[in-house]
C-alpha cells in the first residue's frame, strides 16, 4: 500500500547510507588517511604534501633559556657552601629544524635523514634587559671535564694528579666561571685549560704517550659550552619507518647514528625502536594509548600519557604529559638509566628520609629476601638508604645525560637533568638550593597537544633543567667543595605550528572530514530509527485493523446461519 511504500522509500536508503558511512568511517577513511600520511617521494624526487611538511615542519620553535647565576662562588669553593642561585632570563632563541639528505630504502619501507638545526637570538622576545653579552657566573664545564679524571679513576701515579693540579693552577681554572651568555650557550669561548689541552705542545706530548696521559685519556671537549658551535650543524643519521608496510609504524625509529638501541643505557631504558621521532604519531589515538618519543637533545626516550581533551584552532586535541615517573631512575622501568656513580659520592645525603629508628643491619636472616636496589626498600633495616654496594643512587627527579645533546660523544663529566626548579625532586633535596622554587603550573616537563585523528603535533611545551655535579676531590680548587648538584640553566621550548597549509590540513583531516562523516552517520541512523519506529507502529496498526475486520466478517457470516436455524 501507499504508506508502506513511502516508509520503505526513506528507510532503505537510510540503512544503505548508514552502512556505507560505517564502512567509510572505519575502513575507507582510515585507509585514505594512512595513504595520505605515509612518507614517500614521487618518481621525480619531489615530496607529497604531508612528507614535505614532516621534513620541513611549518613551526616556530622558541627556545627560552633561563640561566642560574651563582651568587656565592667564593663560599662554594673555599667554605664548602651549597650553591645559591638567581634566575636570569629568558634569553629567547627562535629555532628551526630541517630533515635533509633523505634516503629511501629500495622497498620504500624506511627513510633515513639528518636533522639540521638553526638558532637565532630574538631580543624582542627575551627579557627587556637580556643581551647575549650579559655575563653570568655558572659552573665551569671545562674544569668539570678535567676534574672528572681524578674523580672517576684511581690515581696510582701521583705524577698525573700533580700535572692536573699544576695545569689548573697555571691556567687559573676554577669550578666556577664568569662567561657571556651567548658564548656559554652557542658560540663557545676560550678557556685556558682547554687551550692548554689542545695546544701543539700537549698534542705532541700525548702523541708520544700513545694518546693518553700516563694511561689516562683526557676528555675530548675542544669547544667548551652547552651547545657549542651547534648552529647550522647536523645530528647523526636517523632512520625511521615510512608507514608503507604498516601505518602503525609511521616514523618509528629504526636506528640513530647507526645504533639500534641507546647503548649508553641498559634494559628497557635503552629501547629505541618503540619510539617515534615526535613529528607524526599513532593515528586515531585513544585515551589509553601511550606515546613514546625519542629526544636526541636530551639523550633519551620519554613516555607520554593522556592528560585531557582540549582544542587548538577549533580542532579537537588530546593533551599528553610525561608519565609520573619520567625523571625517576629508581622506577622499575627506568633502572637502566641509573647513574653508575663510579666515584661513589652521595650527591643527596639528606635523602631518603628514613624513620629515626632506622638501623642498618644487613646480617639479619630476613635480608636474603629484601632487594635493596628497590626504592621502596631503601629504608628497610636490611638496606643502607640510597647506598647500594659500591654505588649511591640518585634521588627521584634526576637522570644522567650520557651523550652530548644531538651527538653520540659521551659526556666526560656528571650532568644530571631534571625538571625546572627541580620539580619532582624530594623537598629535602631541592630545598638545599636557594633559588629553586618548583611550581606544578609553571614547570611541568612536557605538554604535547596532538590531533587525535592524525597523531600530528598541534602545539607543544617542553621544559628541562641542566645541573652539573660538584664533588670534593683531591684536585686544586675542589678540595673544599660540597658534594652537590648545581643548576646551570633551565630551558622552556615552545612549538607553535604556523601557516595556512598545516592549519587547513589539520582542520580538513582532523576536524571537517571526521565531523562530517559523524554528522551524516548520525543523521542516517536517526532517520532509519525514526522510520523503523514508524514502520513498527504502522504494522501494529495494520494488524489490529486486520484482526478487527476478520472478527466482523465472521459475525456477518454466522448470522445468516442462525437465522436459517430459527426459521427452520
Image (cartoon, rainbow, N blue to C red):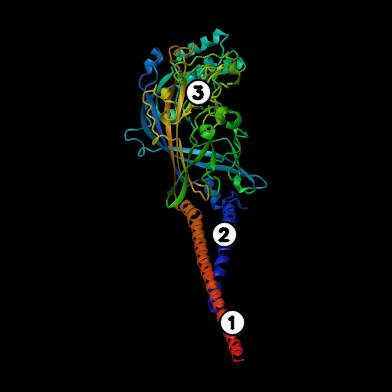
Left or right: 382, with 172 as reference point = right
Does 341 sit above or below residue 492? above
Among all residues in the image, which is located at the extreme bottom? 567
Left or right: 490, with 44 as reference point = left
Quadrant of the drawing holding the C terminus: bottom right
Tell me if label 2 and label 1 are in contact, CB under 8 Å: no
Image x and y of residue 8, in percent: 56, 72
Q: Nearer the viewer, residue 455 or 126?
A: 455
Among all residues in the image, which is located at the extreme top? 158
Local crowd size for mark 3, using a 10 Å CA cut-off: few (<14), some (14–19), many (≥20): many
The residue wearing badge 1 is 554
For the residues carrying marks 3 and 2, which lies nearer the camera in this image?
2
The residue wearing badge 3 is 394
Q: Nearer the viewer, residue 491 or 257?
A: 491
Local crowd size for mark 1, using a 10 Å CA cut-off: few (<14), some (14–19), many (≥20): few
Q: Nearer the viewer, residue 239 or 463?
A: 463
The residue wearing badge 2 is 22
N-terminal of the two: label 3 or label 2?
A: 2
For the residues carrying marks 1 and 3, which lies nearer the camera in this image?
1
Gap between marks 2 and 1, in whole Å? 50 Å
Q: Considering the numbered disc 2 on the image, is that residue within a helix, a strand or a loop?
A: helix
Q: Considering the numbered disc 3 on the image, is that residue within a helix, a strand or a loop?
A: loop
Q: Quadrant of residue 206?
A: top right
Amino acid at each position: 500500500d501507499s504508506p508502506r511504500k513511502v516508509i520503505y522509500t526513506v528507510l532503505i536508503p537510510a540503512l544503505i547510507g548508514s552502512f556505507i558511512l560505517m564502512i567509510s568511517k572505519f575502513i575507507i577513511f582510515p585507509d585514505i588517511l594512512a595513504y595520505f600520511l605515509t612518507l614517500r617521494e614521487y618518481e621525480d624526487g619531489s615530496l607529497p604534501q604531508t612528507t614535505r611538511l614532516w621534513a620541513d615542519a611549518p613551526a616556530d620553535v622558541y627556545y627560552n633559556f633561563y640561566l642560574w647565576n651563582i651568587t656565592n662562588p667564593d663560599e662554594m669553593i673555599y667554605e664548602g657552601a651549597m650553591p645559591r642561585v638567581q634566575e636570569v632570563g629568558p634569553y629567547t632563541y627562535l629555532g628551526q629544524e630541517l630533515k635533509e639528505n633523505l634516503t629511501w630504502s629500495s622497498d620504500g619501507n624506511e627513510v633515513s635523514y639528518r636533522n639540521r638545526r638553526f638558532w637565532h637570538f630574538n631580543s624582542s622576545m627575551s627579557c627587556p634587559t637580556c643581551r647575549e653579552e650579559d655575563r653570568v657566573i655558572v659552573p665551569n664545564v671545562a674544569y668539570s671535564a678535567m676534574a672528572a679524571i681524578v674523580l672517576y679513576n684511581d690515581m696510582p701515579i701521583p705524577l698525573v694528579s700533580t700535572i692536573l693540579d699544576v695545569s689548573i693552577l697555571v691556567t687559573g681554572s676554577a669550578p666556577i666561571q664568569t662567561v657571556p651568555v651567548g658564548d656559554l650557550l652557542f658560540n663557545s669561548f676560550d678557556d685556558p685549560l682547554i687551550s692548554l689541552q689542545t695546544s701543539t705542545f700537549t698534542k705532541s706530548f700525548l702523541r708520544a704517550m700513545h694518546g693518553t696521559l700516563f694511561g689516562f685519556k683526557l676528555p675530548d671537549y675542544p669547544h667548551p659550552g652547552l651547545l657549542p658551535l651547534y648552529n647550522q650543524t647536523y645530528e647523526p643519521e636517523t632512520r625511521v619507518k615510512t608507514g608503507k608496510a604498516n601505518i602503525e609504524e609511521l616514523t618509528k625509529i629504526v636506528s640513530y647514528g647507526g645504533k639500534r638501541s641507546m647503548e649508553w643505557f641498559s634494559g628497557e631504558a635503552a629501547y629505541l625502536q618503540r619510539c617515534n621521532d615526535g613529528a607524526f604519531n599513532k593515528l586515531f589515538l585513544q585515551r589509553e594509548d601511550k606515546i613514546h618519543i625519542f629526544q636526541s637533545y636530551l639523550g633519551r626516550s620519554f613516555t607520554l600519557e593522556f592528560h585531557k581533551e582540549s582544542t587548538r584552532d577549533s580542532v579537537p586535541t588530546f593533551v599528553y604529559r610525561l608519565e609520573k615517573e619520567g625523571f625517576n631512575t629508581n622506577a622499575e622501568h627506568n633502572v637502566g638509566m641509573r647513574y653508575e656513580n663510579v666515584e661513589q659520592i652521595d650527591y643527596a645525603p639528606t635523602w631518603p628520609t628514613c624513620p629515626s629508628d632506622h638501623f642498618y643491619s644487613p646480617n639479619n636472616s630476613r635480608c636474603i629476601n629484601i632487594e635493596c636496589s628497590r626504592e621502596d626498600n631503601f629504608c628497610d633495616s636490611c638496606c643502607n638508604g640510597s647506598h647500594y654496594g659500591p654505588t649511591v643512587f640518585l634521588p627521584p627527579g634526576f637522570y644522567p645525560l650520557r651523550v652530548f645533546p644531538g651527538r653520540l660523544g659521551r659526556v666526560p663529566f656528571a650532568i644530571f637533568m631534571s625538571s625546572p626548579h627541580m620539580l619532582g625532586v624530594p623537598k629535602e633535596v631541592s630545598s638545599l638550593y636557594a633559588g629553586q622554587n618548583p611550581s606544578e603550573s609553571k614547570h611541568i616537563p612536557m605538554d604535547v597537544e596532538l590531533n587525535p585523528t592524525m597523531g600530528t603535533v598541534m602545539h607543544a611545551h617542553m621544559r628541562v633543567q641542566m645541573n652539573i655535579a660538584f664533588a670534593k676531590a683531591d684536585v686544586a680548587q675542589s678540595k673544599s667543595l660540597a658534594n652537590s648538584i648545581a643548576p646551570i640553566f633551565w630551558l622552556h621550548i615552545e612549538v607553535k605550528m604556523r601557516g595556512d597549509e598545516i592549519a587547513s590540513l589539520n582542520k580538513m583531516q582532523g576536524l571537517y572530514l571526521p565531523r562530517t562523516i559523524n554528522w551524516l552517520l548520525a543523521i542516517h541512523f536517526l532517520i532509519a530509527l525514526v522510520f523503523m519506529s514508524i514502520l513498527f507502529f504502522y504494522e501494529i496498526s495494520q494488524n489490529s485493523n486486520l484482526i478487527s475486520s476478520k472478527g466482523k466478517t465472521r459475525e456477518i457470516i454466522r448470522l445468516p446461519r442462525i437465522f436459517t436455524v430459527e426459521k427452520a
